[in-house]
Amino acid sequence: MIKGTTRKRTFRAIYRLLDQVSPVPFDCGRICGAACCHADGLPEMGMFLLPGEDKIHQKTDDWLSWEMLDTDLYDFPPSWQGKVCFVNCQGPEHCKRALRPIQCRTFPLKPVFLKADETLPGLVFRGKEGLALIYSDDELPYACPLITSQARLDPDFIRATYTVWKHLIRDPLIYDYIKEEGTVSPD
């Protein structure tokens, strides 16, 4: 299993911070029938946990199904060697909200690195360090109304999400992941 440098207590603090915010001031799952929370026979409807994020989860919890996948079989950065956790939610009726993975909590935003003069469609926030947040441009088997409408997101959610990713990229493995994940600027 790949191991990052982010400590268990840091992940717990991040989870607590993200517990206090939401992308919009209502349950956005009411708009789309909680499309992002339903695996419904779609094995790709899950997410990879960040290196070390598995430390705060119980693999015996029945609200998530777990797979350990070889990083060589997927498009991970070369620094990711070994196995990585892929989890599927068993649906919103089983969700343990306090344990949702980070990438679930920060959706529909995606962290990217931008050069000072660079911009991208869906840019939501740009920090001083080159780290920016965009509406996720990942291919999804559903249409997220927050992304398609580029809904106005709660400023507290944006700030908390940026703060979280700013801390997480201190871990070299997570930094490499964000650097290589989709729409990022080449060096």
Image (spheres, rainbow, N blue to C red):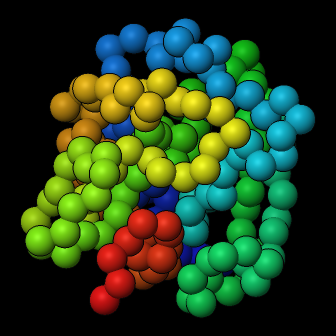
Answer with the quarter of the image where residue 120 lies: bottom left
Estimate the x, y position of residue 146 in percent, counting from the top left: 42, 27
Task: Decide which of 103, 8 is in the foreground and name it.
Answer: 103
Q: Residue at x 10, y 65 (%)?
A: 128
Tally the marks: 0
Whether residue 186 can be seen here: yes
Where is the C terminus found, in terms of image quarters? bottom left
The answer to whether residue 61 is visible is: no
42 above or below 153? below
Task: Measuring from the top left, give residue 94's x and y in whole percent.
Answer: 74, 22
Q: Quadrant of residue 159?
A: top left
Residue at screen point 24% across, 45% down: 124
Q: Quadrant of the N terminus?
A: bottom right
Q: Is residue 152 above or below residue 88?
A: above
Image quarter of residue 76:
bottom right
- What is the x, y in percent for residue 11? 45, 54
Q: Residue at x 38, y 44 (%)?
A: 135
Judge whether 47 appears above or below 32 on screen: below
Pick the front one: 102 or 27: 27
Question: Which residue is nearer to you in this view: 138 or 126?
Answer: 138
Relative horizontal placement of residue 166, taking residue 140 as reference (left or right): left
Residue 34 lies, in percent from the top left, at 62, 20
Q: Is residue 72 left or right of 109 when viewed as pictured?
A: right
Q: Residue at x 38, y 71 (%)?
A: 184
